[in-house]
Amino acid sequence: MNISVITVPGSSYAKYLLNHAKRIDLPIQTVVVVHYGLVRSLKIVHSMFVRRLGWWDTFFFLANRVLQERQQGVVQEWRGSPVIHDYESLAHNVMHTSDLNDPLFLQQFSASKPDLMILAQTGLVKKPLLQIPGIGTLNAHTAWLPEYRGNHVLYWTLYFQQFHRIGYTIHYVDEGMDTGDIIRFTASPPRPGESYDVLQARLMEEAAIGLAETAKECLVQPPKGEPQRAEAGRKYFAMPHALRKNALNNLHRYYRSLEQ
């Protein structure tokens, strides 16, 4: 089976996914790395954050995220094994593009004849790309679907104190935002003492592993997904700072309740 992974430069999530794929002997034919330019990146930031949070909240939120990523540094070992960072060592072919909708890229990618496509932090993709893989496209969403679609979903789950609904959903991808057929949800509640950042990082790692394992199932028989009802869930957007503080307070109260 011909499997392709679509990602962006420097994605730790993609590295976890690809390294686990190598561990379980899941062959990855192609890795596509999408290099968004400055203008495109600013448009994405404006759409996802500035429109909802304003410039100041967006600046401090993104600056804090960059700082956390630098503090974590480049992971050299993961779950007892060295991490391979070189995409050429994790796939047979590596492609680069600045636009997933570029006709020339679509032609070249289609010529590779992928059976299955896996998304690794690329955001929404459009119909021309989704039509290429024969089986379909897989994604892992670090929240319970269909209830928590969209952005900042871990914050929103904490805000509504649905701790038993913290985890990740493996689903097929359609043109909507997290609206494709659901394959499975795996619950992974907060563990005592975990900060928000540690919890989020763990969920991302578990989702990457689950996504690779689901892709391997496709080698035998693609799992059947359960269609989502459009009215069954909600689409969330970036959470303002004041509400993020409430969400974190709920997490701390949850830990205190476990001690009683």
Image: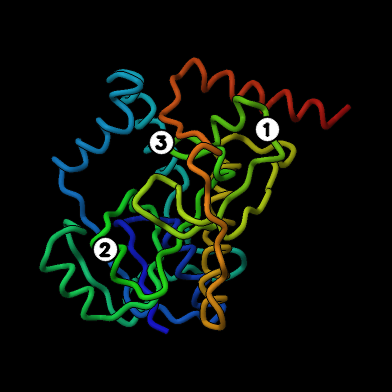
- Number of numbered discs: 3
Q: Say which element carries label 1.
A: loop
| Lower position in the chain sequence, tag 2 or tag 3 | 3
Question: Visible in this render: residue 111?
Answer: yes
Circle 3: element type: helix
Left of 165 or right of it: where is 239? left
Residue farthest toward the left in the current orientation of the protein: 104
Residue that appears at 67% across and 32% down: 162
Write down the residue under mark 1.
Answer: 162
Q: Quadrant of residue 90?
A: bottom left
- Mark found first going from the N terminus, 2 or 1: 2
| Residue highlighted by disc 3 | 65
**Where does the image place residue 37, in percent across and percent down from the top left?**
15, 48
- On the question of residue 89 being in view, the answer is no
Instruction: Tell me where residue 87 sits by quadrant.
Output: bottom left
Q: Amino acid at mark 1?
A: Gln
Compared to residue 178, the image places residue 162 above or below, namely above
Residue displayed at 72% across by 42% down = 191
Q: Amino acid at mark 3?
A: Arg
Q: CA distance from mark 2 to mark 3?
A: 30 Å
Instruction: Say what amino acid the circle numbered 2 marks.
Output: Leu
